[in-house]
Image (cartoon, helix red, strand yellow):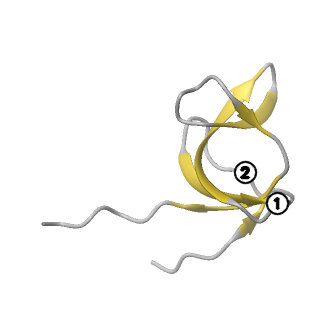
């Protein structure tokens, strides 16, 4: 599986999917994409803090088999 950054303008992750995100500050974080009041938002895993400025995302890699 080849991981490439996907623009939020092109496509959004599935609802409740955890993804690696990067934004306008160029910092990366694992966030959850959530449908909140008919708008998709990116949230920290604690589900309490919304993150603004996400520009791109990619699926998380599969965990190791070991």
Residue 24 at x, y = what percent?
A: 86, 60
Q: Is residue 3 above or below residue 34?
A: below
Measured from the top left, where is residue 5 in percent x and y? Answer: 68, 71
- What residue is rendered at 53% in x and 28% in y? 46
Choose top left, top right, bottom left or bottom right for residue 36. Answer: top right
Is 21 drawn above or below residue 51 in the view shown?
A: below
Q: Residue at x 77, y 35 (%)?
A: 40
Crowding around mark 1 (Cα neighbors within 10 Å: few <14, some 14 to 19, many 20+) is few
Q: Is residue 31 above or below residue 3?
A: above
| SS label for mark 1 | loop
Residue closest to the eye, 60 or 15: 60
In the foreground, 10 or 51: 51
Q: Residue furthest bottom?
A: 2
Numbered mark located on residue 25 in the image: 1
Specify few, some or many for label 2: CA neighbours under 10 Å numbering under 14, 14-19, or 20 or more: some
Tell me the quadrant of the picture where the C terminus can be found.
Answer: bottom left
Which percent across, then down, holds residue 52?
A: 82, 42
The furthest residue to the top: 37
Image coords of residue 56 (percent x, y): 75, 62
Mark closer to the observer (2, 1): 1
Is 29 situated left or right of 9 in this image?
Answer: left
Which residue is found at the position 53% from the left and 46% from the top?
18
Q: Which residue is mark 2?
A: 12
């Amino acid at each position: 599986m080849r991981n490439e950054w996907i623009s939020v303008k092109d496509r959004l992750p599935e609802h409740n999917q955890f993804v690696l995100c990067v934004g306008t500050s160029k910092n990366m974080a694992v966030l959850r994409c959530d449908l909140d009041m008919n708008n998709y938002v990116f949230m920290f895993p604690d589900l309490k803090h919304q993150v603004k400025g996400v520009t791109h995302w990619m699926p998380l890699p599969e965990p190791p088999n070991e």
